[in-house]
Image: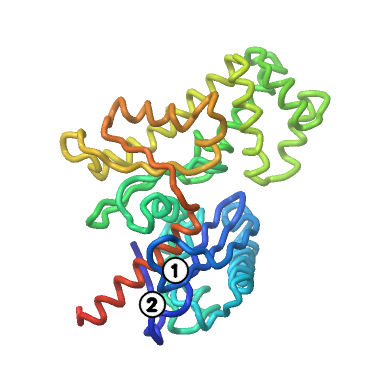
Amino acid sequence: MENHTNGPIKGGDSGVVLGVDGGTTSTVCVCLPYGSTGQVKCLSRAVAGCSNRNSVGENAAMDTLENVMKEALSMAGRDCSEVRAVCLAVSGVNHPSDQKRLLDWLRGKFPSHVKFYVENDAVAALASGTMGKLHGCVLIAGTGAIAYGITEDGREARAAGAGPVLGDWGSGYGIAAQALTAVIKAHDGRGPLTSLTANILKELQLSSPDEVIGWTYADASWARIAALVPVVVSSAIEGDEVANKILHESVRDLADCVIAVVRRLQLCGEDGKGRFPLVMVGGVLESNKKWDIGKEVTKCISKVYPGVNPIQPEVEPAVGAALLAWHMCTKENKKVRNGT
């Protein structure tokens, strides 16, 4: 975990913390009291669009982040002077240079006493299942997909999360893109006939598979493609072999991401039999209980690591980000008071 401070915190345990969960589909910012204990009390919640710079560009992404934080503070009746810590957990933050860019930007938006934490959105998702304490593994499968893990001594590993071009297979985009490809292949004779053709045409209000090509490239938004996942799932439930194959492959891909992270970090111990928490987040994992992708992924992982303990978070990732900021900030303040 990297964390950065820009001067000492002033005052006592008053003020607020901001937690931001920035994804390809939407960005959520919550405002929590800094000194709160026990049950989470959310003062405000603001929602905006995409903040993944790889999807919409850096300027648009930063505009979204700034606006959603301003709105959350305004809704809570607070201002920047009352902010103690900010955790930005944003998809597309994959390298220290990404963190530095956002940290430098944050320093120009808040007073000098505010502490900043910039992470990939997977970190907030993990924190949402562990109430701000980082240990275990998280699997996110929404528009994109990523598995992230961290040990108690701070070692980290991740798998996937590189975006659709580099193959976030198992993600909403990956599932839907394969379905659209299956429609085109069935149409031109390269693939088997599938009910995905009629179901997707109906969903998109198109009259011919030829029109699918134009629709696909008319808008570069990844989330727009991923929105077709429910059509794929319903087609699979109806018995379509092509749709079922796509979903089974997505299960394998998602399970492989988690297995790779667990193996690298030895989260189950050297013998592979220990227990570890697996926080599961994202619309793909919650899409339909009749074809339960999340449940199938867990089954697949348990064949290799029977100690997997799936967790459905009680709070959303933005709250996880805020709790993470609070925990890290509190830990640093204790070190300062203890002279360590």
- Look at the numbered disc 1 and give the secondary structure of its residue: helix
The one of 69 and 309 positioned closer to us in this rendering: 309
Q: Is residue 44 visible?
A: yes
Q: Looking at the picture, how far across and down is residue 110, in whole percent?
A: 52, 79
Q: Is residue 205 above or below residue 84?
A: above
Q: Looking at the picture, how far across and down is residue 235, in whole percent?
A: 63, 21
Residue at position x 59%, y 18% in the image: 242
Residue 203 lies in what quarter of the image? top right
Q: Looking at the picture, how far across and down is residue 270, in whole percent?
A: 16, 38
Q: Residue furthest left?
A: 271
Q: Is residue 102 visible?
A: no
Classed neighbour count for the residue bearing mark 2: other residues with Cα under 10 Å, few (<14), some (14–19), many (≥20): some
Q: Which residue is mark 1?
A: 100
Q: Which residue is mark 2?
A: 5
Q: Residue furthest bottom?
A: 11
Q: Is residue 129 above or below residue 216?
A: below
- Closer to the eye: label 2 or 1: 2
Q: Earlier in the sequence, mark 2 or mark 1?
A: 2
Q: Quadrant of the C terminus?
A: bottom left
Q: Looking at the picture, how far across and down is residue 210, in whole percent?
A: 78, 26
Q: Is residue 250 left or right of residue 28?
A: left
Q: Which mark, by number, is residue 313?
A: none
Q: Amino acid at mark 1?
A: Lys
